[in-house]
Amino acid sequence: MLAALALGVVSSGCGSSAPATLAVFGRVWTGDSSQPWAQALAVQGDTIFAVGDSAAIAALIGPNTEVLHNGRAMIVPGLMDDHTHFMSGGFQLASVDLRDAGSPEEFTARLEAHAARLRPGEWITGGDWDHELWPEAGLPRRDWIDSVTPEVPVFVSRLDGHMGLANTLALELAGISAATPDVPGGVVVRYPGGREPTGLLKDNAMDPLWEAIPDASPTQRDSALTRAMQHAASKGVTAIAEMDGSWWNWAAYRRAHDGGRLTLRVAFHHPLSDWRGLADSMAGHDSVDEWLWLGGAKGFVDGSLGSSTALFDEPYS
C-alpha cells in the first residue's frame, strides 16, 4: 500500500482532525529539503497526510488505525522509472527467465523446463537472454533448442529487444527460410557457408515473427498488467513511463484505471509511427487524470550496441 501511496503529499502537520487510517513508524526520508528526515508518517484514505516525529504521528492514531513499526528499514518516496516496457514485462514475468542463464546448457535447460509446462502450439516469448554471459559460445542458435521445443514455437529476445532467437517451428510459422532476404534495418543471421537461418533475427528482420505470434486477449493483457504492477510495488516503483504503447495496451490501462485497479501513475507513450492516431487521441483529450495520461510518442532511428545493430564508426565489442 505504501508503495502505491508514496507520491502523496508530504507535510509536517495534519490538515484533518480525523484519525489516521494507517500510521507507520520508522526512519523516513522525505525528499523534501526543508524536512529531509522524519520518524513516522500517517495515511488517511489514499493520501499520506502527515510526516513528522513519533509523538506527532502517535497523536493521530485512533481506535481503528492500523499501526506498523518498520524497524531498521527506511521509508522513502516512491520511485519513478521514466523508460519501461511495462506491459511486456508483465508478460515476461509469466514466461521463461533467461536473463542470468550463464551457459548454452543452462539456456537450453530453462527453455526445456518451461516448454514442458505448455500445450503444443503455445508460444514461448520473453527470455531477456544475454550472450555476453557465455562469450566463448557466441550467439545462440536454433539447433541449441529445437530438440527440446519440438511442439512449441519459440521466439525469445535478447535483453535489449533488438535481437531474438526463434526455433525452427517458429521460423516456419513466420515464413522465414533460406530464401528470405535481409530487409532494410534488419538481419537474418545465417549459418556459415550458406543461407540457412540460425534462428537469430535482428531488428526489422524480427517483424515476421511478431506478426506470427497471436495477439494477446484483453484478459491476458489485464493479467500481465496486474503482474507488472505487483512487481513494481514490491520494488517501491510508483510511477512509470510506458514505452510499450499500443492501443490494445492503452485499453488495458484504461480498464485498470476505470476499475480502480491502477496502483501506479502512468505516462503512456505511443509509437511515433502512428503519430496521427496519437495526435487525434490527444486532441480529443483522451488522457484521463494524474494517474494515467498520454505522455507523448516514442521513436528511434538506429539499433543497439549489445546487438551490434547500431551504426558504428569502428567495430564495437
Image (cartoon, helix red, strand yellow):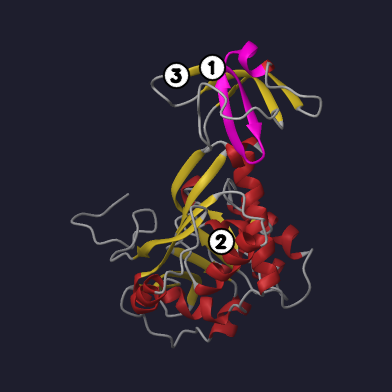
Question: Is residue 64 left or right of 14 when viewed as pictured?
Answer: right
Q: Secondary structure at mark 3?
A: loop
Q: Residue at x 53, y 65 (%)?
A: 141
Q: Nearer the viewer, residue 36 or 198?
A: 36
What amino acid is at disc 3? Gln
* For residue 108, above or below residue 37: below
Q: Nearer the viewer, mark 3 or mark 2?
A: 3
The quadrant where residue 17 appears: top right
Give the residue furthest to the front: 17
* For residue 236, above or below residue 109: above
Measured as percent of width and height from the top left, residue 14 is found at 57, 25
Marker disc for residue 35: 3
Crowd rating for badge 2 (residues with CA inside 10 Å; few <14, some 14–19, many 20+) = some
Q: Nearer the viewer, residue 161 or 23?
A: 23
Earlier-in-chain disc, 3 versus 2: 3
Give the residue furthest to the top: 55
Q: Residue at x 50, y 46 (%)?
A: 239
State the quadrant of the N terminus: top right
> Residue 49 in magenta?
yes
- Which segment is the magenta one? 38-57
Marker disc for residue 38: 1
What amino acid is at disc 2? Ser
Measured as percent of width and height from the top left, residue 291 is found at 52, 53
Question: Is residue 245 left or right of 27 when viewed as pictured?
Answer: left
The quadrant where residue 220 appears: bottom right
Q: Nearer the viewer, residue 243 or 51?
A: 51
Discs 1, 3 touching: Cβ within 8 Å? yes
